[in-house]
Amino acid sequence: MNRSDCTTETDMWSDWLLHTRYAGDPDQERSLRTDLQRYADRVLDGARLVSGMTLADIGAGDGLIAFRAIERVGPSLRVHLTDISAPLLRHADALAIQRGVRGQCTFVHGSAEVLKGIDAASVDAVTTRAVLAYVPDKIAAMREFHRILRPGGRLSIAEPILRDDAFEASSLKKIVDALPQESGDQFFHLLHRWKAAQFPDTDERIAANPITNFGERDLVRFALDAGFTEVHMEFHIDVGPSGVASWEILLGTSPHPLAPTLGTILSEQFTAEERLFFEQVFRPQVEGRRLATADRTAYLTATKPQL
Ligand SMILES: C[S@@+](CC[C@H](N)C(=O)[O-])C[C@H]1O[C@@H](n2cnc3c(N)ncnc32)[C@H](O)[C@@H]1O
């Protein structure tokens, strides 16, 4: 990576990944990291790495997959960490030095759609987790993964499917639109305003937004269109109690890097009276640990055909 690219200290990607996703709370971070390790291991199981291989982790963030791969395979593994965020690459670079694995890593700055700096047929495995949602041209990205893999190389992806969250926002919009004008019922209005600030809430907006305009079956199609074979998809839906442990954490977090936090939404889009009502309704739910959450993750593995 060209270090002169790192002109800013932080950007929206690094802000979210390094702080907002756990509201800057160390206990929340510890609990999140336990879950993240499970995603990382599952992705790496699909990549089938062995000694001496080269891995490209696309949208590497703070190195979740890359450093776990090095832990699992050892000093013979080489890893390209790519990311659109220069601050995150710099952060991962510093972590690699701390971990004593800098010599195994190279850092590639740029979007997943154009992996300049990684030669054709030069890597044994490509991994990516929670990145394609933010890539406007997912087919181009998939073609790049295919280009850089050697024949017989493995692709392993874990991608959150956020479309259903948007469908929930869209259902709330329909409820709100159907409420009589004179209805004094604030609840659905406020709930909709919260969700619509974080997810598109009409069919048109859902179809136009890269985070919601695809589902697990589209990922299979993109992989086949790019030329992969042995394509395998597992779609996991886990619904259970929310991991949000306090009202402050609910206010300080957001569900993805492009979404404002609830705290920002309340302060910028709600009146003082609406904020009070909202807190009276929701705070007891959070503190009573009655909030539920749904995690929807698509796991795709595939192979680049032998010549
Ligand atoms: C939710 S984070 C996931 C980070 C990491 N893969 C992980 O599993 O912890 C999304 C990552 O995708 C990166 N990203 C966003 N758009 C990208 C793009 N077009 N190409 C490559 N990386 C991108 C962000 O900078 C961020 O590191």
Image (tube, rainbow, N blue to C red):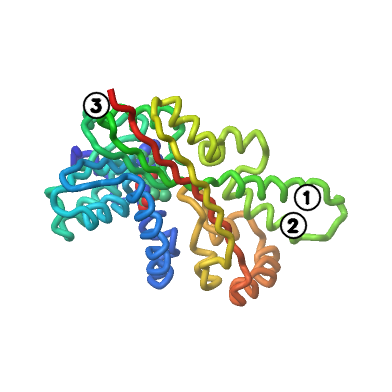
Ranked by sequence position, the earlier of labels 1 and 2 is 1
Looking at the image, do the residues carrying marks 1 and 2 touch, with CB atoms under 8 Å apart? yes
Please tell me whether mark 1 or mark 3 is closer to you in this view. Answer: 3
Quadrant, the C terminus:
top left
Q: Amino acid at mark 1?
A: Ile
The residue where tag 1 is placed is 175
As drawn, is 253 to the left or to the right of 95?
right
Q: Residues within 10 Å of mark 3 (few under 14, many from 20)?
A: some
Locate the N terminus and report the quarter of the image it occupies: top left
Q: Residues within 10 Å of mark 2 (few under 14, many from 20)?
A: some
**Which residue position is annotated with label 2?**
188
Alpha carbon distance from label 1 to label 2: 7 Å
- Residue at label 3? 120
Say whether marks 1 and 3 touch (CB < 8 Å). Answer: no
User: Which SS class for mark 1?
Assistant: helix
Q: Earlier in the sequence, mark 3 or mark 2?
A: 3
Residue 193, percent across and down? 66, 52
Find the distance from the CA under tag 3 to the CA under tag 2.
Answer: 52 Å
